[in-house]
């Protein structure tokens, strides 16, 4: 894998953290009143290879190894400003992590409009097919801290910042199209309940504990989201292989001022893929950074992840006819009812240069919106419009966080906001108020509002139940909590339904309060009687009485778009395939397989008992990973090219046996030569359509073999 050379410590000019003008964003944003702001500052990315090491004020440093002491063995002197500054800066390197979505991975890219839709929206980026705009994306888990693992059962954040010519548009979504709650009022309760319990400080990055399920059992509106969170959607194989959703209904507004509702969807070009729970748990140990590494390595290798942007557009008349409220974020609109129209494609093509400066400091704001797109009255969205702006002040410490390069727009920005902590702009003149008549004295009078092109809120909302009175209530249709939970569950394949039941059993087994378990199962009876029975059986409890729903659920038509397995593809593109070899392996068989996999767009990872290079036919071969450190959970499919001797030896090696046992148990394709058979036998690998000869691997691909699952897991 090509690796960029790391800058040597001696070339650092030490300006990284305090240097506001070092990124592309700030350079372009400087066109506005930011003026010639940072031009006097040396830029970190412009330093020469042989640059001098300096402190933060530009003083050259003579010795970066030893502190200043009174004599060789004497105490360190307080006057050592070099040491003091270095430690001082280090002591303050961390900032508060995000209250949710603390663990994330970012990437730069480009969005291209593929279908102009001026009839629907006047938004700058949708006016012309072929028009592009830079983006920055951050994927995340929700519950865990910044240092937690990548593969817990959790929702994934999917936040996109579009740097458009009309200002930044942030589409801050998730990989699940609905949410736990209907009203922003409940968000702090939800987050408190799912995070580590307040007295004991655990569990980390897990919803399987008392307080979460206690809250959920009492919140019937959460059960649709619970179906998604207990499904394979919450254990995605890769950020590159999951969908993204804007969740809320937004509005498109066209140049004539006509508006329609819109829901945003991201469809991964690589298709959807998830792991199985046993695999996700083992991945957390084998590689806690699995998804972060996967994203970074794919982009580094030039295998750029892509998503199509789709929109579901509908009007008030459609909304009025649905049995759910389109302003309720616990509801989706089935794709079968309103098709997803593709209007653009996003390609992530550049890794961040610096994780902290970009991925950590990026601040997404649902309130960042551009003319042509508008909010709806969704009460969850309305609360978010406040929260994200507010939280940046405590996370980034200043109202000037918009000046951090990753957050700054790439179009000009001018206004009369001034000063504040860490102000880095140097506005000229004295026009810091408006109206003013300074122009009459030939002075710069500053910018003026633009009634024609500026953002103006869509005036008529026409939404149902739009009451003039101030009421702390929910609209009537918000009371149907279970119809769509049922729709989701019934749209899954039999295996997927079993996964949901097992996930619920796992989670509720970790709950120690009996009444909490009982209540959750009582709620499940509103979704599907069979599901409730399976979970009760799995917990070995009596089926509790149904908890009476606020509104009786209805049966909606099954939607295949909600299932991952129904849309399964045998793709090799973007997938990672491990080939196990050992002393004496046939190198031509290995390179033939490698060639075919790479031609199909996959990548190969060689695994062997030792990494440094072992004798194979025709020479020696280095492995990419050592067997015990490269368990099969890290790959989409596995292959073995071994001699009979090596297979016999490896049959006595736990890591090798486990390798195949897991690959088989996780329903992966296993390709092998005849000599490997005894090792496969030892691992309990039984013949089926997914256990194939090396020559057949490409035909079968990396699809999971779900019909194998009943052999390896109790799905009852
Ligand atoms: Fe968030 N959410 N959220 N959220 N959210 C945050 O903002 C909040 C919600 C989402 O990679 C915080 O900058 C409230 C829905 C993502 O930086 C915070 C409510 C959806 C990210 C916040 C919601 C999301 C966040 C924490 C209910 C999917 C990570 C740090 C009213 C549509 C963005 C921060 C990143 C982050 C508040 C509900 C997605 C506290 C109050 C629904 C992807 O402001």
Image: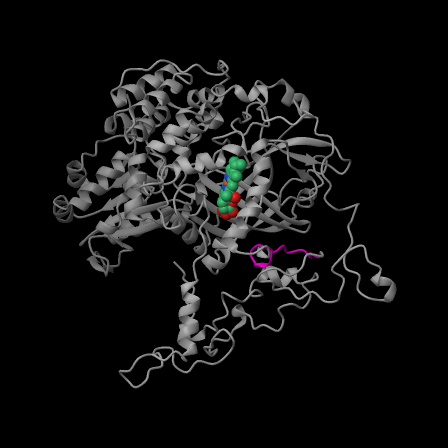
Q: Is 443 covered by the magenta stretch?
A: no
* Residue at the spot 15% in from the left edge and 49% down from the top edge: 646
Figure quadrant of the C terminus: top left
Q: Is 411 covered by the magenta stretch?
A: yes
Q: Does residue 374 lie above or below 166 as drawn?
A: above
Which region is colored magenta?
402-414
Q: Does residue 523 lie above or below 577 as drawn?
A: above
Predominant secondary structure, magenta span: loop
On the image, the x and y values in percent for residue 373 come to: 67, 39
* Residue at the spot 34% in from the left edge and 77% down from the top edge: 65
On the image, the x and y values in percent for residue 149 come to: 35, 46
Q: Does residue 552 lie above or below 193 as drawn?
A: above
Figure quadrant of the N terminus: bottom left
Question: Closer to the camera, 58 or 172?
Answer: 58
* Residue at the spot 25% in from the left edge and 35% down from the top edge: 664
On the image, the x and y values in percent for residue 302 come to: 46, 54
Question: Closer to the camera, 381 or 483?
Answer: 381
For residue 353, side relative to residue 210 (left or right)? right
Q: Which image quadrant is residue 343 in?
A: top right
For residue 531, side relative to residue 683 (left or right)? right
For residue 79, side relative to residue 347 (left or right)? left
On the image, the x and y values in percent for residue 422 come to: 57, 62
């Amino acid at each position: 894998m090509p690796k960029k050379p790391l800058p040597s410590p001696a070339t650092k000019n030490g300006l990284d953290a305090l240097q506001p003008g070092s990124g592309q964003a700030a350079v372009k944003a400087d066109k506005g009143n930011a003026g010639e702001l940072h031009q006097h500052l040396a830029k970190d990315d412009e330093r020469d290879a042989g640059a001098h090491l300096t402190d933060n004020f530009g003083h050259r440093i003579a010795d970066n190894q030893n502190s200043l002491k009174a004599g060789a063995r004497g105490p360190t002197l307080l006057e050592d400003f070099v040491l003091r500054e270095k430690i001082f800066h280090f002591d303050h390197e961390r900032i508060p992590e995000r209250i949710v979505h603390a663990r994330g991975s970012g990437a730069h890219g480009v969005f291209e409009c593929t279908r102009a839709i001026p009839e629907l929206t006047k938004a700058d980026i949708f006016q012309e097919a072929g028009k592009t705009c830079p983006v920055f994306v951050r994927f995340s888990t929700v519950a865990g801290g910044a240092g937690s693992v990548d593969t817990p059962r959790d929702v994934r954040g999917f936040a996109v910042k579009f740097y458009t010519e009309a200002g930044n548009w942030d589409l801050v979504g998730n990989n699940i199209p609905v949410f736990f709650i209907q009203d922003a009022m409940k968000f702090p309760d939800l987050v408190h309940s799912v995070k580590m319990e307040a007295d004991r400080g655990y569990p980390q990055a897990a919803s399987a504990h008392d307080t979460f399920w206690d809250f959920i059992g009492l919140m019937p509106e959460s059960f649709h989201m619970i179906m998604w969170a207990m499904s394979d959607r919450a254990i995605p194989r890769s950020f590159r292989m999951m969908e993204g959703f804007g969740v809320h209904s937004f509005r498109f507004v066209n140049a004539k001022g006509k508006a329609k509702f819109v829901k945003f969807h991201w469809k991964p070009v690589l298709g959807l893929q998830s792991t199985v729970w046993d695999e996700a748990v083992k991945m957390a140990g084998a590689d806690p950074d699995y998804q972060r590494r996967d994203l970074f390595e794919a982009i580094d290798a030039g295998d750029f992840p892509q998503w199509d942007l789709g929109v579901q557009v509908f009007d008030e008349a459609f909304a009025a006819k649905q049995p759910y409220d389109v302003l309720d974020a616990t509801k989706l609109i089935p794709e079968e009812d309103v098709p997803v129209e593709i209007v653009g494609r996003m390609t992530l093509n550049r890794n961040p240069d610096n994780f902290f400066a970009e991925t950590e400091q990026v601040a997404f704001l649902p309130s960042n919106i551009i003319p042509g797109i508008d909010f709806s009255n969704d009460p969850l969205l309305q609360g978010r419009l406040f929260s994200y702006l507010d939280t940046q002040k405590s996370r980034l410490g200043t109202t000037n966080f918009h000046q951090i390069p990753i957050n700054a727009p790439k179009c000009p920005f001018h206004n009369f906001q001034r000063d504040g902590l860490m102000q880095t702009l140097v506005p000229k003149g004295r026009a810091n108020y408006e109206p003013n008549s300074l122009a009459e004295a030939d002075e710069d009078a500053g910018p003026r509002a633009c009634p024609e092109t500026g953002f103006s809120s869509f005036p008529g909302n026409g939404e149902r139940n739009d009451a003039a009175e101030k009421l702390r209530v929910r609209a009537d249709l918000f009371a149907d909590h279970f119809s769509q939970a049922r729709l989701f569950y019934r749209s899954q394949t039999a295996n997927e339904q079993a996964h949901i039941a097992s996930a619920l059993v796992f989670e509720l087994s970790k709950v120690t309060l009996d009444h909490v378990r009982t209540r959750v199962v009582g709620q499940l009876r509103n979704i599907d009687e069979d599901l409730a029975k399976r979970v009760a059986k799995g917990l070995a409890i009596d089926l509790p009485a149904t908890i009476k729903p606020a509104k009786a659920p209805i049966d909606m038509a099954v939607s295949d778009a909600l299932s991952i397995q129904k849309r399964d593809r045998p793709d090799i593109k973007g997938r990672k395939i491990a080939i196990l070899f050992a002393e004496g392996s046939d190198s031509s068989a290995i390179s033939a397989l490698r060639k075919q996999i790479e031609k199909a767009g996959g990548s190969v990872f060689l695994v062997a008992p030792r990494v440094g290079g072992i004798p194979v036919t025709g020479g020696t071969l280095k492995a990419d990973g050592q067997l015990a450190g490269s368990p099969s959970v890290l790959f989409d499919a596995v292959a073995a090219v071994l001699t009979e001797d090596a297979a016999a030896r490896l049959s006595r090696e736990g890591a090798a046996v486990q390798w195949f046992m897991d690959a088989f148990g996780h329903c992966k394709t296993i390709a092998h030569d005849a000599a490997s058979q005894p090792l496969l036998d030892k691992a309990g690998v039984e013949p089926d359509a997914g256990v194939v000869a090396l020559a057949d691997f490409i035909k079968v691909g990396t699809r999971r073999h779900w019909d194998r699952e009943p052999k390896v897991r109790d799905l009852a």
